[in-house]
């Protein structure tokens, strides 16, 4: 995926012609976005969907000549978004402060002009910040090779909602949260998020003078928090999409068991994080509704039943299945004792060795590069390791095999 150059006019390499797509996007959004959308809260979903479409169109138009982003550049992407959001926040608060001073000097007649101007500045601040964050998220996803569906940017919107909710105090966790995200009215959730974001924007800018600093700092901090969550989710999405694709190519029937494995591994460290919750729902949305219902009923605290059912995994799919579990344990860039215990039980049930060095190598790969290469030869590598395993090694729980280079 490529850089969206239209949103970086400060770079010397950006020509005036490169700004035309941005102008076209702004004009199109202005025609599509209605006053009713702002009142109902639907403005945020409309803005995000429009920008994702714009981003994908720009990628298709510039793919031949633009340089692809890399995961190592995500911190710079987030810093730029934080700077832009802080600047917009400070500007909006400055306008609000100026309107307050103007009202104090001119009285009621001045308020008739100043209050609408201040309100428009607050609303524009929230919308511009959302647009900056949409650009940031699309660039982060592109750096990891993850595509956001312009017709269904569900993951982006719900990651935003969970991140915003984390700052305000969530009221659901674990299986309850996953189930609620799957069954909730999506349009209603989008409108609720838009209204909350608009209300938060008013609170940031309503205090004169003080708001110039607080609005800027709050915009910076929230954009940084959301950017970090976007990076985490993009890393999870790229890693698990690759791992699940390898399992699906061998035997799609065991995907339900693999999603349950993701649930138990993600919960091994404690409460689900925002990116883990969205990733679980993304996986559940990819399977038929009947299978989804079955999996939801099994999202419990006891993993013994899941381990026992791993014997159902067909032999040709077990190598890819075990590798997918290893990726899920390593993707958060740390491996707890609870995760090791679960991996040990799964390896024993699948008749595979517990490859500590391989998991640790995956952790290092995620830390240094953010992604691991697509494992098209994972099955061959694991079969080779079993062939060279000593005959008396059996399936000891502490068996370790040193893998080849990743």
Image (cartoon, helix red, strand yellow):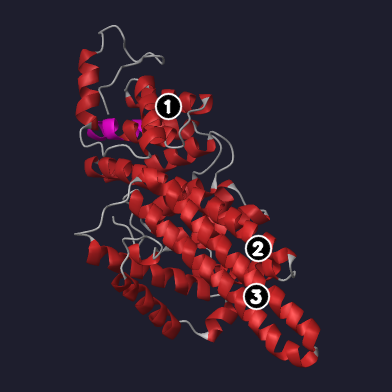
| Front position in the image: 150 or 215 | 215
Assess whether residue 286 is covered by the magenta stretch.
no
Give the mark, 2 or 1, whose residue is nearer the N terminus.
2
Identify residue for label 1. Answer: 343
Q: CA distance from mark 3 to mark 2?
A: 12 Å
The answer to whether residue 89 is above or below residue 96 is above
Mark 3, residues whose alpha carbon is within 10 Å: few (<14), some, or many (≥20)? many
Give coordinates of residue 94: x percent, y percent: 66, 71
Are the residues flagged by discs 3 and 1 in contact, CB closer than 8 Å? no
Identify residue for label 2. Answer: 215
111 sits left or right of 360 in the view? right
Identify residue for label 3. Answer: 95
Element type where label 3 sits in the image? helix
Magenta segment range?
A: 310-320
Give the mark, 3 or 2, whose residue is nearer the N terminus.
3
Q: Quadrant of the C terminus?
A: top left
The answer to whether residue 76 is above or below residue 50 is above
Element type where label 2 sits in the image? helix
- Figure disc tally: 3
Q: Nearer the viewer, mark 2 or mark 1?
A: 2
204 sits left or right of 179 in the view? right
The label number, if any, that marks residue 85 in the structure image: none
Q: CA distance from mark 2 to mark 1?
A: 46 Å
Look at the magenta stretch and give its main secondary structure. helix
- Is residue 191 visible in the rendered image? The answer is no
Give coordinates of residue 243: x percent, y percent: 31, 40
- Is residue 107 visible in the rendered image? The answer is yes
Mark 1, residues whose alpha carbon is within 10 Å: few (<14), some, or many (≥20)? many
Residue 189 figure quarter: bottom right
Q: CA distance from mark 3 to mark 1?
A: 57 Å
Give coordinates of residue 230: x percent, y percent: 46, 51
Give the residue displayed 20% in from the left and 33% down from the top.
Answer: 377
């Amino acid at each position: 995926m490529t850089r969206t150059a239209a949103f970086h006019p400060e770079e010397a390499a950006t020509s005036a012609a490169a700004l035309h797509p941005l102008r076209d996007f702004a004009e199109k959004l202005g025609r599509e976005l209605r006053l009713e959308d702002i009142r109902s809260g639907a403005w945020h979903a409309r803005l995000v969907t429009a920008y994702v479409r714009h981003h994908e169109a720009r990628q298709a138009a510039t793919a031949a000549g633009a340089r692809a982003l890399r995961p190592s550049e995500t911190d710079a992407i987030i810093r730029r978004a934080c700077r832009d959001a802080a600047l917009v926040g400070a500007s909006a608060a400055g306008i609000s402060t100026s309107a307050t001073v103007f009202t104090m000097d001119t009285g009621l007649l001045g308020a008739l002009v100043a209050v609408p101007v201040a309100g428009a500045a607050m609303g524009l601040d929230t919308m511009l910040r959302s647009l900056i964050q949409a650009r940031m998220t699309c660039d982060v996803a592109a750096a990891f090779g993850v595509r956001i569906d312009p017709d269904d940017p569900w993951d982006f919107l719900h990651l935003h909602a969970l991140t915003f909710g984390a700052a305000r105090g969530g009221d659901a966790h674990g299986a309850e949260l996953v189930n609620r995200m799957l069954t909730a009215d999506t349009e209603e959730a989008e409108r609720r998020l838009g209204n909350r974001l608009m209300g938060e924007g008013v609170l940031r800018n309503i205090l004169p003078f003080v708001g110039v600093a607080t609005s800027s700092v709050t915009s910076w901090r929230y954009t940084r928090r959301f950017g970090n969550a976007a990076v985490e989710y993009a890393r999870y999405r790229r890693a698990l999409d690759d791992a699940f694709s390898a399992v699906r190519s061998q035997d799609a029937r065991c995907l339900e068991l693999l999603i349950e494995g993701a649930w138990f591994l993600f919960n091994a460290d404690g409460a689900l994080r925002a990116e883990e919750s969205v990733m679980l729902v993304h996986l559940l949305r990819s399977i038929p509704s009947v299978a989804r219902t079955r999996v939801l009923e099994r999202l419990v605290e006891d993993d013994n039943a899941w381990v026992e059912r791993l014997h159902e995994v067909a032999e040709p799919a077990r190598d890819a299945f075990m590798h997918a579990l290893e990726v899920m344990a390593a993707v958060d860039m740390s491996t707890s004792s609870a995760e090791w215990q679960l991996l040990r039980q799964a390896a024993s049930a699948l008749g595979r060795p517990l490859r500590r060095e391989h998991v640790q190598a995956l952790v290092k790969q995620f830390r240094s590069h953010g992604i691991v290469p697509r494992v098209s030869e994972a099955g061959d590598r694991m079969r080779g390791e079993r062939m060279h395993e000593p005959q008396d090694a059996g399936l000891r729980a502490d068996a370790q095999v040193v893998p080849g280079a990743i």
